[in-house]
Structures are given as structure tokens and as C-alpha cells.
Image (cartoon, rainbow, N blue to C red):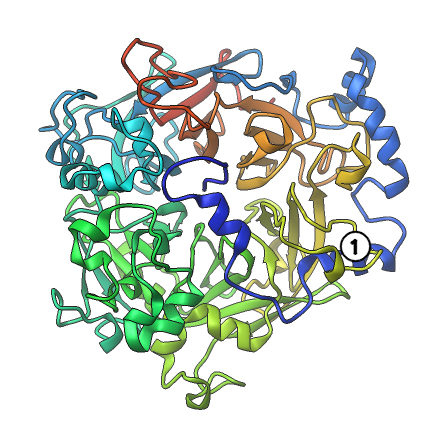
Amino acid sequence: MNDKTDLSARSYDASQDEGVNVPAVATIGDLIAARFSRRTALKGMTAAAAVATVGGAIGASVSREALAASQSSLTFKPIPHGYDAELHVAEGYDPQIVIRWGDKVTADAPAFDVNALSAEAQKKQFGYNNDYIGFFPLPAGSQNSDHGLLVINHEYTDRQLMFAGIGPDDLDKQTKEQTEIELAAHGMSVIEVKRENGRWGVVENSKYARRINGLDSQTVMAGPVAGNARLKTSADATGTKVIGTLNNCAGGETPWGTVMSGEENFHGYFGGKPESAGAEAVNHKRYGISDKPWYAWPKFHDRFDIAKEPNEPNRYGWIVEFDPYDPTAVPKKRTALGRFKHEGATSLVNKDGRLVVYMGDDERFEYVYKFVSNGKVNLQDRKANDGLLDDGTLYVAKFDKDGTVTWMPLVHGVGPLTAENGFKDQADILIETRRAADLLGATPMDRPEDVEPNPVTGTVFVMLTNNTKRKDDGVDAANPRAANAHGHIVEIIPAGGRGKDADHAAQEAKWDLFLLAGNPAEAGHGAKYGDGEMTASGWLSCPDNVAFDKKGRVWIATDGAPKAGIADGVWAAEAEGHGRALTKHFLRTPLGAELCGPCFTPDSTTLFVAVQHPGDEKDSTFENPVTRWPDFKDGMPPRPSVVAIIKKDGGEIGS
């Protein structure tokens, strides 16, 4: 997701820096401090006394780089930090543009003409600001790494880079046609891709190709909230039929090969003071809806005006599931997984056969969640799993200072989740998941983004991007990260430990710290990485998305690193053993961009990445962008794109 300053009209950074939750319990920063004070050395981490030594690596010699490389199976030569108009990747690798904003998706899509945009064309073309990427091999159920489907989320739009003559805050200048182009550019794309002669390309006229947009695509509500009175609107008296999906950020795949897409910052599309929504006022305020929307949509579409349609926001903020192998499949919003600002949803089959889904609520002082199905996964019959996400228990995490994670059930009638506190049934808890989690005393976190299990080790990595609003007077001297500008990564070890005995459905687990991001040469950052020496460009800032290759190595994508003077990009590290948490710089984005959606093919010979909002810097416009990546043609603005990265010798990425 996006975390830059002076971006589009929606002002992501301002909204997330403020947050809407005032924590009443210990923050994750308090708990990390307690963990550090409890023991002098953190297993697998650089001790505090070694920070100066790591800092000395900023002028790393060749011998030191060789030493770091010898501790890791990641043998690529790291690239230096930097920030310019180009995309850079490690030596020996080939970045290939797969698809760009406006490129053809459906067979009847017209050619892209940036000077003659239309909503009808955009509904058939690749959408804007690509985030999550999922690779689904063809045929379904195979491990084919040369042919498959890519499913891509389109999170939001940047008007100043899409349209001539308009700035990021010029809502009053927007036309109805422009707002409908923006709506059409949201949602998701499904494309068929194939690697031939070492190059990836889109298969034209594919029977699988489709666009799901925010303007007129059909989605349906499923699970405990479907049909609830709080979902009914003047356009849908049933409370089950919704137009499209919005602010789709990260996502994940189910074990049976369907997509789970997270609706994240839905609040910015709606306009009106919360008080104008009557009974929904407290609910809307808790999710950040205000009379200052990011877009002009409420002016032209009544469903985004909460005074006219107070229930419409309740129809967004869910996990959306659909089958990419079936182009007629109607996406379903799986309400049992709760409503909040979903960064994504990643899953695994527990040792008892049940499905476990991990999720983060991406805002400062928000929470980490998991869902455990009641039924078991059927890998022999894909269709048999259709309702599995509608029946189960949603939990929220409490991180204790002794290293324990307690997963607290969000179930009506349990603890404070009763009618006396405004929850008359389970549907109310799922619509107002944040408020329910508040009452349970969940641990406020520093912007939980990707929460993803490592398929090799079985531990769960929690990306915590940053939290600059943690005050000095809210922590003590033991807390190393007041005003956390650089973020960190927490690792959850499930009950039973690593490997086949791991029980992800249990209500207790353990937690530890993987790394504290930032520059270890700057004492004020309090950065901590693995036990060993880093190269000059090994440090990162603002971890966001994460992926694991077939060896279980961790690949970290960042969002917000330019605030630390470096480009966003990808860093890789071992998850275990030598080289654990010693990150190496693999890729960096062009000016204004963040790096999203890292996704490997099953054989780890291709890494797909999403370059989102290139050129989105202060004073960068359609006419005069800071970069014209990837086309670099006069008159063509920068275009969000999906990139396939392969090793030139055809080997596995990273080694």
C-alpha cells in the first residue's frame, strides 16, 4: 500500500499518520522494549552493542561483502542504494515489463490512448496502481512455472498523473467522466501469461482474461453478514448485491486455487460528516470516514455520500474471494473474516486439516487477526471448499511481554462482545470488527501490513511498516523505538513450534523480533538486523509486503523508504541459520514508486513484482512527471506496471 507524502488527492500519509484508534493498552513498542530489557541478547539478532560494528560496514570492503555472502545462500551481488528515474535490479537479472496501465486485458479492449481516456475503455484495459500479484499455474493444480494466470489488484488512482491539467487536490475540477474512469481503473485484473524463449508475455484473447472494476462489476456478500439490515441500501434492498470492489491492496491464495483480495482504505472514497449517517456515525468515525474524501465521487455518485446512503460503507472493507480459473465466477465478500482495512490475507492448511487465514489491519495502532475455519480443506475437490470461508472463528492478537501471543475470539457473547456494548449479534461484531477488538484489549501495532506464513519454516512474518505517532511520553527508556519511522518485522511461532507439529489454530503462540528496520549507522534509528556484518545497502526502511521462495528465504518489499533518503525496493534474507535477518538489496524502484506484490513461480525462477505509482512525487504532473518510466516517451506519463524478473542464466532467483 502507499505511504508517500504529497501524493494524490486522498492524502494517504496524513490519514495513516493520524490513525483513528487511541490505544488503551500497551503498544507493540512497549512490549519490544520489555523483551529487550528481559534479555541482553536477542537470538538471531544483532546485539545493541554491535550496532557500531554494523555501522562500520557502511564503507564495506570487498572482503566484508564476501564474508556476508558466505553466511547466506543468497549469492547475488547487492545493488547500492539510490533514487532515480529508472528501475534497478541486481547484476545478472533481467527485468521484463509484462503489462502496464491501459494495456489490453479483454479481447475487445481498445488500444490505449492516454489523451482520449474513457470509462468504457478502462473497464477492458489494465487498471491503475497495481499492488498484489498472484500466480496461478496452468493447468489448475499443476506446478507449471512457465504458464499461468496472474491476478493483480488495482488499489487506487493518481489523478494528477492520469489526466492533464489537474493537480492532486483539484477535486473541484474533476468531471463525472474522470471519476468514472477512476472507478473503472480500480478493482482487479486477470491475465494469462506464458514464458517462451526466456521472455514473459501476455497471451492475447485468453478465455481467462477479465477485469473486475469499481464502476459496474457485480460482487455479492457471503457469510454471516450477508443480507443484514446494515448492508441494505436504496439500490439493494437485499443487502447482498454490491457494485465492485475498492482499494484492493494485498491479497493471497487459498490452497484450492482461489484469490483472496483485501479491501483496504475504503473510507477515503466516502464523503460526509459521520453524524450525517445517523446510527452508523460511531462506526464510520472508527473507520476514518470524514467530510474530506480523497475523490470527487460523492459529487456524482450518491452511493459515496453517507448522508444519502449511510449503509454503503459497510459493504466495503472485506476480503473478496473468486476463482481465477472461472471467468464467470462472481466475487464474494467473505464477511466471516471481519471488516477492517485489509492489507491482505494469506492462508495455510493446519495440521488438523482446517484452513487458517492471517490478516493485518493497515493503520497505525491497529491489530493483527487470524481466521480458523470450522470445516476442513478438500484438496481433491476444489468446489467443495466454496463455503469454507463463511464458517469459522475470527481472532485478534494480544502480544504479551513474556513472548506469548494470545489469540482472542471475536465471538458474540464472549467477554464484552454483548448487546450491552452495542453488539446485538455476530453480524455487528463483523461489521465493527475494530471496535470489538478494542474492547477485547488487542495489542495496537505499528501498521500491520502483510501477515504471511513461511511455507518452509511454518512461522508467520508480520510486516509492521511504521508508526511515527508513538509519543516519547508513552514509552520508557527501555523502548528503543519511540516515533517508529522505519518499521520492523515480528515473527510468530505457532504452538508446537516450527515444522509439521505447528498448530496454527491454537489460541496461544510465541512471538519474537526478526528485525528493526532503519540505518544501523544512525544511532537514533535503533536498527537491528541479523548477527553478522551487512553491506552498505543492506539496511531498509518501512517493510510492507513479503514473499518466500521455495527455500523459505524472505523477500521484503518496502513502502516509504524515500523518507529515509533511499528508493523503495526489495531486500532478501535468510529466515533461519547463517544470514538470518541480514538483508541484501536486490531491486529498487524509479522515482515516486513503491514496490508491491512480490510473487514467485513455484520453481522460484521468476519473481513478479508490481511497481506502483511511479512518478508520484511532489509537483510531479501529467505534463511534467519526475519520471516517464517505463515507456520514457514524450507525452506519455509514468505507468504502473507488472515486472517479471528472471535470472539471465535461467537459475533460481537469489542464488
Amino acid type of the residue that numbered disc 1 sits on in the rendered structure: Asn
Q: Nearer the viewer, residue 600 or 524?
A: 524
Report x, y in % for residue 523.
82, 36
Image height of 187 relative to 401, above or below: above
Q: Is residue 167 visible?
A: yes
Report x, y in % for residue 541.
63, 36
> For mark 1, does the 10 Å Cα neighbourhood hold few (<14), some (14 to 19), or many (20 or more) residues?
many
Image quadrant occupied by the C terminus: top right
Determine which quarter of the picture holds residue 555: top right
Image height of 643 relative to 250, above or below: above
Determine which quarter of the picture holds residue 54: top right
Residue at the extreme front of the image, as rendered: 172
Q: Nearer the viewer, residue 365 or 11?
A: 11
Q: Residue at x 38, y 19 (%)?
A: 625
Report x, y in % for residue 394.
46, 70
Residue where numbered disc 1 is placed: 479
Residue 208 placement, left or right of 155? left
Residue 630 placement, left or right of 2? left
